[in-house]
Amino acid sequence: MNRAKSAISKAGSYEEMGKFWDAHDLSDTWDKTEEVKFDVDIKSERTYYAVDNILSERLHSIAKERGVSADTLVNLWIQEKIQEKKHGPKHGSSAAKH
């Protein structure tokens, strides 16, 4: 790596940086720090919902089979249901046949 990832530790990798901070304390190098200003724009928010234990176990099992997290699977399924409500039932469903 050509450039150091850290001005204080002069580490060339995150692993080296971790080793440096495992052995040092910020108070040892406080005089080398600079004040930084930045904005944080948090666009996502988490809302938690209670899920029955049996449903949760089944959800985790299905998510594992599909190779995704349970959180991802829940979000995908909810997104699908919202799209169905927004655009009406999908072709081939019993509601569409009537």
Image: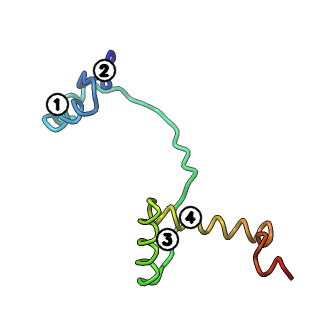
Instruction: Between residue 13 and residue 81, name the one nearer to us.
Output: 81
Location of the N terminus by quadrant is top left
Q: Quadrant of residue 92?
A: bottom right
Q: CA distance from mark 1 to mark 4?
A: 45 Å
Closest to the camera, between mark 1 and mark 4, is 4
**Residue appearing at x 64%, y 64% in the figure:** 79
Point out which mark residue 48 bears: 3
Which color scheme is applied? rainbow
- At mark 2, the secondary structure is loop
Residue type at the position of mark 2: Ala
Q: CA distance from mark 4 to mark 3?
A: 12 Å
Residue type at the position of mark 3: Tyr
Label 2, on which residue? 4
- At mark 3, the secondary structure is loop
Residue 53 versus residue 73 in the image, above or below: below
Check if mark 4's residue and mark 3's residue have beta carbons within 8 Å. no
Check if mark 4's residue and mark 2's residue have beta carbons within 8 Å. no
- At mark 1, the secondary structure is helix
Label 1, on which residue? 28
Residue type at the position of mark 4: Asn
Closest to the camera, between mark 4 and mark 3, is 4
